[in-house]
Image (cartoon, grey):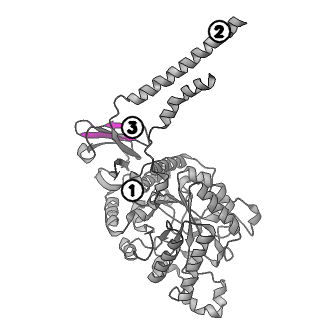
Amino acid sequence: MKKGLLSIILIPFLFIYALPAGAADPNDRKWQDESVYFLMVDRYSNGNTDNDYHVDSLDPDAFHGGDFEGVIGKLDYIKDMGFTAIWLSPIFDNADKGYHGYWVNDFRSTEEHFGTLDEFKTLVDQAHNKGIKIILDFPVTHISDTHPWVTDESKKDWILSEKETEADGPEPFDSSWLNGLPKVNLDHKEAGDYFIETAKWWVTKTDIDGLVIDEVNKTPNSFSSELSKEVKGLKDSFYLLGEIQTTDAETIAQSQGNGMDGFIDYPLAKVLRPSFSEVDQPLTQLIDAKEKNMKLYSDPYLMGTLMDDHKTFRYTRDSITKNQHPGPRWKLALTYLYTTPGIPIVYYGSEIALDGGFGTDNHRQMDFRTDKELVDYITSLGELRNNFPSLTRGQMEILGEKENLIIYKRTYENQTAVIVINNSSESQNIAIDADKLAKDKEIRGLLSDDLVKEENGQYQLFLDREEAEIYLLAEKSGLNIPYVIVSILIYGAFIGFIFYLWKRSKKQRANE
């Protein structure tokens, strides 16, 4: 009797949870659906003090102790923010003080400060178990000046006579830690083959999901194309992200067709940063740049979009130098990144508005004991991006711009999302003509509980200063009959259960 009654009570709850949520099919995920968290292993989290050799957390040029176990311990933290992929700084054996990973001594060994190969495999396995992909930074154009090749006479043709120079990274980039490093001659077939075989070795040994190829413009197209062919022959869904230190979109477009799936969209960041680093900035330039890049790039949905990374100064610095509170500045910028075509890449520490300038000042230690307001906002954006394919696959159309406010929509199949970003110091009323969306429907706020119905051929919105909202187009709700029925069933079952207990108690007292 008890079990039967409990089943009756649970049926309405099961019915509620069975209602469609609009989420994307997890088995149909594409790279454009991912969102990437980029972290520098040494500066992230120290999970194993046994590998802390010559660690000095007070020296910005020394190892600080971050390792694979530290990343493993933070996988839930990263997953809970909605990230579905992690880009790791180079993990290979490095020269002394090569905490950043770019002074490589051996491309087939892990850096001892980070952990063993088996520990890295564990990191990949545990990430995969949580639905997170792993991308490795793979610097193929240079080596450490203490690399064995430097003194190996048989490898002298593998190394070019000139050295890496700081001038190779123009403003706003800083790659000073590469200054003076020996350059690899990737035109030499044996040298190129070594890196291709090494990439395949990492895929086979550890099951990684992607590679970032630094300075891909300095690699021969024949090398990049062959690398792409070989690694994708091992794993169909493998992702190759090219990096070119330029803010010129046309330069990046000219490198397309070399095997890379996408490139880091520094040209977009060049426009994004000043657009959102302070309030009351017009967004016209941002609109123009996005529309231009959508035409230039062969697949803009696979471009890596970001605000900053380890080779620039941090975006937080932009707002601080302009006497702006970084929280709202980050929220608006991230809303744009998460809701426009491209794969959003968020550099570690952005979720706490970590400050930093060039070089080591950019590579500050992560702090997990700070305010979580921005973390919560990123979590909300991540949930929406993971649940609504219109935000990752939808066609983008600008609906309007008004007084430092931008409105656009993303449409995929039968789903339409409307994004409004108010970069103004004033609250604003916005009217969207129904012809641009649909008549006799409503748009529901996903970041708040706002709900706007079409009336007299328009959707009348109100947005507070320095706020953003993501709406979903839906049928007018009216009286929600299914909800009313379910509510009646739940309350009826509850009252019936209480009545049953009362009757039973009364019967027991009568028998005593």
Q: Nearer the viewer, residue 195 or 460?
A: 195
- Label 3 and label 2: CA atoms lie apart by 49 Å
**Mark 2 crowd level (few <14, some 14–19, many ≥20, 10 Å Cα):** few
Q: Where 237 falls versus 426 (above or below)?
A: below
Answer with mark 3 or mark 2, whichever residue precedes in sequence. Answer: 3
Looking at the rendering, which quadrant does residue 182 occupy? bottom right
In this picture, residue 351 sits left or right of residue 300: right
**Mark 1 crowd level (few <14, some 14–19, many ≥20, 10 Å Cα):** many
Residues tagged 1 and 3 counted as in contact (Cβ below 8 A): no
- Amino acid type, callout 2: Lys
Residues drawn in magenta: 444-463
The residue beneath circle 3 is 450
The residue beneath circle 1 is 393
Element at badge 3? Answer: loop
The residue beneath circle 2 is 506
In this picture, residue 14 sits left or right of residue 275: right
Answer with mark 1 or mark 2, whichever residue precedes in sequence. Answer: 1
In reply to whether residue 51 is colored magenta, the answer given is no
Which image quadrant: the C terminus?
A: top right
Query: Residue drawn at (25%, 43%), measured in percent from left and top?
Result: 434
Which image quadrant: the N terminus?
A: top right
